[in-house]
Amino acid sequence: MKLSKPVKATLLGIVISTAVYVGTYIALSFFGGYYFNQSGKVRYRSMGLSVSDISTWNPKGCWYQAEFKNTKGISVSRGNDLGYLFSPLIILDRKYFHPTVILIKPKNPDETYWFPL
């Protein structure tokens, strides 16, 4: 089967774009690190603010969190522009290479733990 020139050009463009996307992520990940973050599942009893209860891997300049429990108890995502751009690769990276470290475990994972303060 012979491909036409437009199809070849489109496939080449997809391959090059994917290589640049993944290559850029690898470079950013090389200079990344673990940072304190909040899951929203642990909050200060006195004021309701989230406690930094997890440590997540973030590539340089990227910030993304797939699941954060807000004050209404709804799970939302949050991050910056680069974090959302690279979110699929950040999720894979955290699953296989840089897992999230839980610093404070709630007694019941389905309920908000109220940290005494």
Image (cartoon, helix red, strand yellow):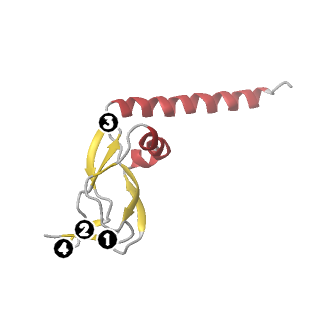
Of badges 2 and 4, the one in the foreground is: 2
- Residue at the extreme right of the image, as rendered: 1
The alpha-carbon separation of the residues under discs 1 and 3 comes to 30 Å
Q: Quadrant of the C terminus?
A: bottom left
**Mark positioned earlier in the residue sequence (2 or 3):** 3
The alpha-carbon separation of the residues under discs 2 and 4 comes to 8 Å
Q: Secondary structure at mark 1?
A: loop
The alpha-carbon separation of the residues under discs 2 and 3 comes to 27 Å
Of badges 1 and 4, the one in the foreground is: 1
- Mark number, residue 43: 2
Residue hosting label 1: 112
- Mark number, residue 47: 4
Is 76 placed above or below 58 here?
Answer: below
Tag 4: residue type? Met
**Mark positioned earlier in the residue sequence (4 or 3):** 3
Residue hosting label 3: 32
- Residue at the extreme left of the image, as rendered: 117
90 horizontally vs 44: left or right: right
Of badges 1 and 3, the one in the foreground is: 1
